[in-house]
Image (cartoon, rainbow, N blue to C red):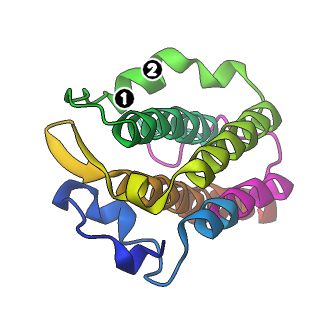
Amino acid sequence: MKKRDLPFIPPFYTKYINLVPDDMELISGLITSKNNLYALRAHFSGDESLSYFRNKWTIKDALQHNIDNERIQAYRALAFSRGEINALPGYNRELYAKYAYASNRSVEDLLKEFVLVRNSTIALFESFSENMLLKQGTCSGTKLSVAALGFLTIGNTIRHTKIITQYFLKLHNKSSSS
């Protein structure tokens, strides 16, 4: 399924899903966004505990958030694909970040976990039939499809890859050249 084939995009999730090109296939998007985020490892230098603005996340926090979000969206997709009729709750990303203690982990460890989680997500979405991708459920008070959750996952990774590239790595390059 391509993003342009989504029957609808819930308004709250457009800022993530719209980062995905319209002609991108779901599975190839999951693979490409995984590879693009993982490729940033070559640019990390040990100052990944710095935040790009005061009271903002660090690279480690952003990576941990991506892992947590991925697990949550994959669970939602599984539940909806299996016909879950109960509304699923939202989650507080700031609270998750606070108690994840990402600062106690290495970037390499976080990236390794991200790849494992993403590969599991890819296997899950590869198992869905076209009908399963179109099934819908409710989470955070919003109705969305299994496919939309997949593209949301891709968009979230694209967003955090851009943030890491534009803010963290730009700051690192400025401090390295000083």
Residue 42: horizontal and vertical position, in percent? 86, 57
Residue 110: horizontal and vertical position, in percent? 72, 34
Identify the image quadrant of the C terminus.
Answer: bottom right
Mark 1: which amino acid?
Glu
The reply to whether residue 147 is in sight is: no
The correct choice, above or below, for 59 with respect to 166 in the image is: above
Within the image, what quadrant is residue 28 found in? bottom right
Q: Give the range drawn in magenta.
A: 33-53
Residue occupying image coordinates x 45% and y 62%: 130
Residue receiving disc 1: 94
Residue 76: horizontal and vertical position, in percent? 39, 36
Disc 1 element: helix
Q: Is residue 29 magenta?
A: no
User: Could you tell me how many numbered marks the image carries?
Assistant: 2
Residue occupying image coordinates x 79% and y 60%: 39
Residue receiving disc 2: 98
Mark 2: which amino acid?
Lys
Q: What separation in Å lies between label 2 and label 1 (alpha carbons)?
A: 6 Å
Disc 2 element: helix
Q: Is residue 92 left or right of residue 28?
A: left
The correct choice, above or below, for 34 with respect to 22 in the image is: above
Q: Is residue 172 left or right of residue 57?
A: right
Between 85 and 100, the one nearer to me in the picture: 85
The correct choice, above or below, for 27 with respect to 108 in the image is: below
Q: Are marks 2 and 1 in contact (CB under 8 Å)?
A: yes
Residue 144: horizontal and vertical position, in percent? 25, 52
Within the image, what quadrant is residue 102 found in? top right
